[in-house]
Image (cartoon, helix red, strand yellow):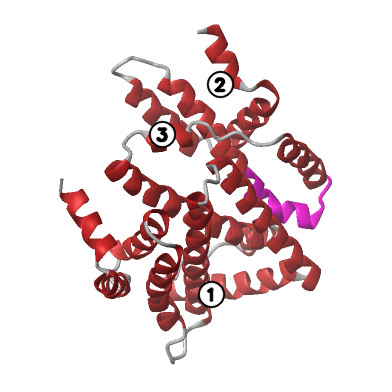
């Protein structure tokens, strides 16, 4: 098996793998393979070697980010956001790979990740209570630069409405983007490991993500506070929705897994198309499934009935 041979080579040739990881990160599209290699080595071989590879996979982003040269404000904002997400998500991918290596479940990893994200957003608001205004100014400059460059202009009212809505969630959205990227990379690395060394194990792990009662209580409280307009809670809601959507999709995939129909893949595809085109209502529905699962333990009930 070709993947088996590639994996064995990466696990047995330390310095060649470091060089390969560093070089491949510079290549667009496939550059993300660098951090996947780092996570795989962390999971399968060594935390220290995984850390070395994670650094090698992150250095190219840092080098591009700190290259001398003046960027236009709009380009600077996009570059800052993109590089910031890439660097932070790489670091967090390695951290979560260490947790998974130490036998933490995906349920624990997802909840700890969300907790860290919530703490980060809360601390940012504590340090800078006017962070939403800062985002508003940055987004205003970005919109103006983009409109000047493209020649496409929005009405002032539409632009102000978009900025005022986005700035309330911007810090949380950035943090959620980092967590989402890191967790997707972790799952991809775990898929790689499972495919080579323990086929079928990943699906079992991902289909049994269930959140704690404490997470459910905090989510309900956050929903109430966000409805009342609390600025900090509004900013952490993207992170909580990410967590509960992941848990809700785990339940849905478990139920689909009980189907023995050859058309099962069609229904899964239809589900994701529905989620995309009915956003954000679909996010709320999937989150509600995760919330109900905390109290009902859907999997246990289904098994007992079967």
Element at label 3: helix
The residue labelled by disc 2 is 299
Task: Give the foreground label among 1 and 3.
Answer: 3
Left or right, 197 with respect to 154, comes to left
Query: Which badge, 2 or 1, comes first in the chain's sequence?
Result: 1
- 19 or 275, nearer to the observer: 19
Number of the label disc, if any, that sits on residue 203:
3
Question: Which mark is drawn over residue 59?
Answer: none
Name the magenta segment's main secondary structure: helix
Confirm whether the magenta stretch covers residue 237: yes
Where 277 sits versus 258, above or below? Answer: below
Q: Magenta span covers which residues?
A: 228-241
Residue drawn at the location 61% of the way across and 62% of the way down: 159
Mark 1 → mark 3, Cα distance in angstroms: 38 Å
- Which quarter of the figure is the N terminus placed in? top left
Between marks 2 and 1 in the image, the one whose residue lies nearer the viewer: 2
Give percent across and percent down for residue 104: 55, 46
């Amino acid at each position: 098996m070709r993947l088996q041979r590639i994996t064995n080579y990466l696990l047995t040739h330390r310095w060649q793998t470091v060089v390969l990881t560093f070089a491949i990160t510079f290549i667009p599209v496939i550059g993300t393979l660098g951090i996947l290699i780092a996570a795989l080595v962390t999971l399968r071989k060594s935390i220290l070697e995984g850390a070395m590879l994670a650094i090698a996979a992150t250095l190219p982003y840092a080098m591009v980010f700190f290259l001398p040269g003046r960027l236009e404000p709009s380009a600077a904002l996009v570059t800052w956001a993109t590089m910031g997400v890439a660097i932070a998500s790489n670091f967090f991918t390695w951290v979560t790979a260490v947790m998974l290596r130490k036998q933490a479940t995906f349920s624990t990893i997802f909840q700890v990740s969300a907790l860290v994200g919530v703490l980060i957003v809360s601390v940012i608001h504590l340090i800078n209570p006017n962070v939403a205004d800062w985002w508003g100014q940055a987004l205003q400059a970005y919109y103006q630069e983009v409109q000047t460059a493209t020649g496409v202009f929005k009405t002032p009212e539409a632009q102000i409405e978009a900025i005022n809505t986005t700035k309330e969630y911007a810090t949380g959205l950035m943090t959620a983007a980092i967590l989402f990227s890191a967790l997707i990379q972790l799952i991809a690395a775990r898929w790689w490991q499972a495919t080579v060394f323990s086929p079928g194990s990943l699906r079992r792990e991902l289909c049994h993500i269930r959140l704690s009662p404490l997470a459910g209580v905090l989510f309900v409280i956050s929903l109430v506070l966000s409805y009342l307009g609390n600025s900090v809670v509004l900013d952490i809601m993207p992170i909580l929705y990410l967590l509960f959507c992941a848990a809700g999709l785990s339940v849905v995939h478990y139920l689909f897994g009980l189907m023995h129909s050859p058309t099962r893949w069609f229904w899964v595809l239809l589900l994701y198309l529905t989620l995309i085109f009915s956003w954000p209502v679909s996010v709320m529905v999937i989150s509600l499934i995760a919330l109900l699962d905390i109290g009902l333990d859907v999997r246990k009930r289904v098994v007992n009935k079967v």
